[in-house]
Amino acid sequence: MSILAKEVMGEGILDELYDLDSAGDLELDQRINEYGIDHSLHADDDRDCIIQGIAEEEIDKLENACS
């Protein structure tokens, strides 16, 4: 997968995650909390960093599925 494709996919995933977060999606909120605990981040103070990390995990999953 090209770097540009990763960036476009990453932006789409990030947009989706931010939309879900602003809508108060409980499943995403749980995942944010778990990711924060696993990476020693605070779910409120480090929310942007956590969402970015979740997006990167999703991209990695998609790349592995396509390989």
Image (tube, rainbow, N blue to C red):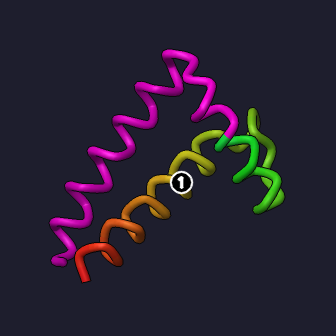
Q: At 44% across and 37% down in the image, what residue appears?
A: 17
The amino acid beneath tag 1 is Ile
Residue 43 left/right relative to 4: right
- Image quadrant in which you'd find residue 55: bottom left
Mark 1 — residue? 54
Q: At 41% across and 25% down in the image, what residue appears?
A: 19
Which quadrant: the N terminus?
bottom left
Is residue 14 placed above or below 29 in the rendered structure? below
Which quadrant: the C terminus?
bottom left
> Nearest the camera: 65 or 28?
65
How far across and down, in percent of the image, does residue 26 sit?
A: 62, 25
Q: Is residue 64 magenta?
A: no
Residue 46 left/right relative to 67: right
Judged from the image, the secondary structure of the residue bearing numbered disc 1 is: helix
- The total number of labels drawn is 1
| Label 1 crowd bin: few (<14), some (14–19), many (20+), radius 10 Å | some
- Image quadrant in which you'd find residue 28: top right
Q: Is residue 15 magenta?
A: yes
Is residue 17 placed above or below 38 in the rendered structure? above
Q: At 82% across and 53% down in the image, what residue appears?
A: 37
How far across and down, in percent of the image, does residue 61 sit?
A: 41, 68
Is residue 63 placed above or below 37 in the rendered structure? below
User: Start and end of the magenta stretch?
Assistant: 1-30
